[in-house]
Amino acid sequence: MRSPLPTALPGCVLRPWRAADKPELIAQANSRAVWRNMTHTFPHPYTPEDGDLWLAIAANPGASLQLAIEVDAGVAGGIGAIAGEGIFQATAQFGYWLGEAYWGRGIASAAARALADHVGAEGLFARLEAQVFEWNPASMRVLEKAGFARDAVLRCAATKDGRLIDTVLYSRVFPNP
Ligand SMILES: CC(C)(COP(=O)(O)OP(=O)(O)OC[C@H]1O[C@@H](n2cnc3c(N)ncnc32)[C@H](O)[C@@H]1OP(=O)(O)O)[C@@H](O)C(=O)NCCC(=O)NCCS
């Protein structure tokens, strides 16, 4: 995607990451509260080297989508859909995060709805899925508002922050017409 994808929230668009985003990326991502809800690929502390690595990945996403969430011209966080491989090529892992300063304003809901609708409208994947940690009801609500359904509770599926926890699997599907 080259041009920004609008969302229903005024001032909030999804657009490709840029090299110049590095300072804002690090400022927003360097948060224990964000890290605690993300997979092991999201580091803490979030160093300048982590920022370089991420921007290099996002510059060459292949079949995946990796976009910055921009709010009033500032980088608020990121959202993406990581393409599966082989028999799972039509499935993508859907994920998003916001810097703490941006929480509680409907931004993730607007961003998730916009990207999921875009995937469906463009036929990019047949299935988007996300695993949410048991202690993250706000993210479960974000997914429900973006048209995802709760598929299952995956018991004892993840180890995070020193605890063995359940995850809740959500998906939104776009079957062949
Ligand atoms: C989870 C996260 C993305 C939410 O972003 P956000 O922009 O604050 O979310 P929104 O404002 O769009 O919506 C949150 C919804 O959850 C609800 N919510 C918030 N806290 C809640 C709680 N403790 N229990 C139930 N619902 C809750 C809100 O009321 C809102 O629903 P509503 O619009 O029906 O009122 C953000 O907190 C974040 O980035 N967290 C760290 C990373 C993360 O969790 N990523 C997702 C991994 S699966």
Image: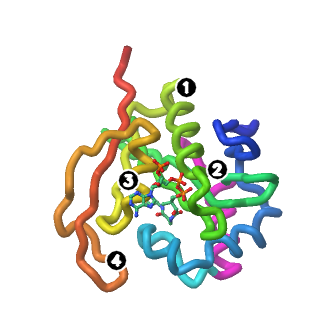
Return the residue at label 1.
122
Identify the amino acid type marked 1: Glu
Identify the amino acid type marked 3: Met
Q: Which mark is residue 67?
A: 2
| Marks 2, 3: nearer the viewer | 3
At 43% across and 56% down in the image, what residue appears? 139
Image marks 3 and 1: residues in contact by CB distance under 8 Å:
no
Question: Disc 3 versus disc 1: distance between alpha carbons?
Answer: 25 Å
Residue 1 percent location from the top left of the image = 67, 37
| Marks 3, 4: nearer the viewer | 3
Return the residue at label 4.
160
**Magenta range:** 47-67
At 71% across and 54% down in the image, what residue appears? 17
Give the crowd class for mark 3: few <14, some 14-19, many >=20 residues within 10 Å.
many
Image marks 3 and 4: residues in contact by CB distance under 8 Å:
no
Question: Disc 2 versus disc 3: distance between alpha carbons?
Answer: 21 Å
Residue furthest top as drawn: 177
Image marks 4 and 1: residues in contact by CB distance under 8 Å:
no
Q: Earlier in the sequence, mark 2 or mark 1?
A: 2
Image marks 4 and 2: residues in contact by CB distance under 8 Å:
no
Q: Is mark 1 within 8 Å of ligand 1?
A: no
Q: Earlier in the sequence, mark 4 or mark 2?
A: 2
- Numbered label tally: 4
Identify the amino acid type marked 4: Lys
Give the crowd class for mark 4: few <14, some 14-19, many >=20 residues within 10 Å.
some
Q: Is mark 4 within 8 Å of ligand 1?
A: no
Residue 39 percent location from the top left of the image = 42, 68
Return the residue at label 3.
140
- Determine the secondary structure under disc 2: strand
Question: Disc 3 versus disc 4: distance between alpha carbons?
Answer: 17 Å
Which picture quadrant has residue 162? bottom left
Q: Earlier in the sequence, mark 3 or mark 1?
A: 1
